[in-house]
């Protein structure tokens, strides 16, 4: 290879490297061409606070989210509370989204972008059901820098686009629920009673023990006995349904008491291959210690009333692991006997 040709190849390589660096760390030279950098949804940034409903459909699955007095609710779950942060992040992302790259205008190729049968048909509406944004949402990828890139199509556009900023979404109503059920400091739990065994912890101590342990029995290690308290302190659920009186017979009932008088009763049911819990809450201080714990609320009755309002009349679908902890029996809390 001649020296002149070597020099030409060297210059071309250098130019390519500089161009790559410019694209990665500098401004995209094509950003201002053909709508790049413009708002994905014209006018949505200034109108996003008017959003009162979100409709998401994919095939035969749909989710309707409605806002009432500043809170969002899932209509397909009888108006159970939606995760406010999740809805807010989705709307904020849509309002700030920008067009990144124009893509195909051939709808026969939309399936390559997730904009065909699997697409999410999304509409953001105001209080008068006027669309603030309406689009198909396809494949989405999160990047290491926290920015997402998503394929979308609007009927008002001539082609599909790759856009920034959109948060993840789903047409599954359960996906949008506020999945937090209980939030109680683990240090407050004094006793957790199963039908055939009770785990207790004396006030001022750290370790749990098995109540009325028999002479030939040995309890498991403390970290294993703590499983129910850890679970109940931050209990979550996968799905919810509004049922006043389940038709199925209960399979288990677990009662947890705190030192300061809060009583939780979880009644478990097996339905449609899953475990569901009905939660009852009361306030029963019996030793004058209510409110003396650092983590206890000043108003125990108010806490019980708030939890009752949240849980009464609902069944909560538990994860397989959580259901397993609550369905344990006496033998599951006892150490195995060494062979003779």
Image: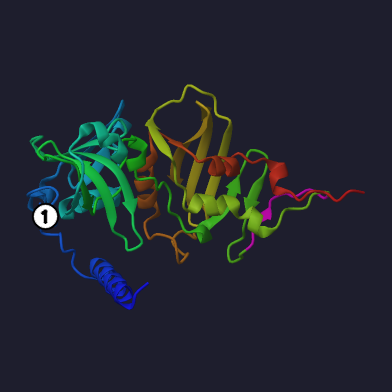
Q: Is 184 in front, or is 149? A: 149
In the picture, residue 11 is in which quadrant? bottom left
In the picture, residue 103 is in which quadrant? top left
Residue tagged 1 = 38
Q: What span is colored magenta in the figure?
A: 207-215
Label 1 crowd bin: few (<14), some (14–19), many (20+), radius 10 Å: some
Picture layout, residue 260 above or below residue 281: below
Q: How is the image coloured?
A: rainbow
Outermost residue, front side: 2
Q: Is residue 119 visible?
A: no
Please state, as top left, top right, bottom left or bottom right, where the N terminus lies in the image. Answer: bottom left
Pinpoint residue 49: horizontal percent, then vertical percent: 12, 50
Pinpoint residue 276: horizontal percent, then vertical percent: 49, 34
The structure residue drawn at horizontal position 8% and vertical position 48%, both measured from the top left corner, is: 42
The structure residue drawn at horizontal position 10% and vertical position 52%, both measured from the top left corner, is: 35
Outermost residue, top side: 247
Q: Is 77 in front, or is 200? A: 77
Pinpoint residue 31: horizontal percent, then vertical percent: 15, 59
The structure residue drawn at horizontal position 34% and vertical position 54%, both measured from the top left corner, is: 142
User: Which type of secondary structure does the marked residue at label 1 adopt?
Assistant: loop
Instruction: Please indicate whether residue 224 sits to the left or right of residue 111 in the image.
Output: right
Instruction: Please indicate whether residue 202 sits to the left or right of residue 308 in the image.
Output: right
Instruction: Please indicate whether residue 72 sits to the left or right of residue 133 in the image.
Output: right
Numbered circles on residues, count: 1
Picture layout, residue 169 above or below residue 275: below
Q: Is 176 in front, or is 255? A: 176
Q: Is residue 209 visible?
A: yes
Pinpoint residue 326: horizontal percent, then vertical percent: 58, 42
Magenta span includes 118: no
The structure residue drawn at horizontal position 40% and vertical position 54%, both measured from the top left corner, is: 300
Outermost residue, right side: 340
Main secondary structure type of the part rendered in magenta = loop
């Amino acid at each position: 290879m001649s020296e002149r040709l070597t020099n030409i190849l060297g210059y071309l390589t250098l130019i390519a490297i500089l161009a790559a660096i410019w694209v990665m760390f500098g401004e995209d030279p094509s950003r201002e061409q053909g709508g790049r950098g413009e708002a994905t949804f014209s006018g949505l940034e200034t109108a996003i606070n008017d959003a009162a409903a979100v409709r998401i459909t994919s095939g035969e699955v749909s989710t309707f989210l409605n806002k009432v007095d500043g809170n969002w609710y899932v209509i397909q779950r009888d108006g159970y509370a939606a995760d406010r942060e999740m809805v807010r992040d989705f709307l904020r992302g849509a309002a700030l989204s920008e067009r990144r790259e124009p893509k195909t205008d051939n709808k026969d190729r939309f399936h390559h972008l997730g904009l065909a049968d699997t697409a999410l048909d999304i509409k953001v509406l105001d209080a008068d059901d006027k669309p603030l944004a309406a689009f198909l949402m396809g494949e989405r990828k999160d990047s290491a820098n926290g920015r997402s890139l998503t394929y979308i199509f609007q009927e008002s556009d001539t082609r599909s686009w790759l856009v920034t900023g959109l948060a993840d979404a789903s047409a599954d109503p359960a996906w949008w629920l506020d999945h937090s059920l209980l939030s109680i400091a683990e240090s407050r739990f004094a006793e957790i009673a199963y039908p055939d065994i009770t785990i207790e912890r004396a006030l001022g101590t750290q370790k749990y023990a098995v109540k009325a342990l028999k002479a030939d029995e040995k309890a498991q290690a403390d970290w294993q006995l703590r499983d129910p308290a850890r679970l109940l302190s931050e209990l979550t659920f996968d799905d919810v349904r509004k049922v006043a009186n389940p038709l199925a017979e209960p399979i288990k009932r677990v009662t947890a008491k705190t030192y300061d008088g809060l009583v939780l009763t979880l009644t478990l049911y097996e339905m449609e291959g899953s475990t569901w819990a009905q939660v009852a809450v009361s306030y029963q201080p019996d030793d004058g210690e209510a409110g003396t714990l650092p983590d206890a609320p000043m108003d125990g009755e108010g806490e019980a009333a708030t939890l009752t309002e949240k849980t009464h009349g609902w069944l909560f679908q538990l994860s397989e692991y959580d259901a397993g902890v609550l369905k344990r029996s006496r033998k599951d809390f006892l150490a195995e006997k060494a062979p003779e």
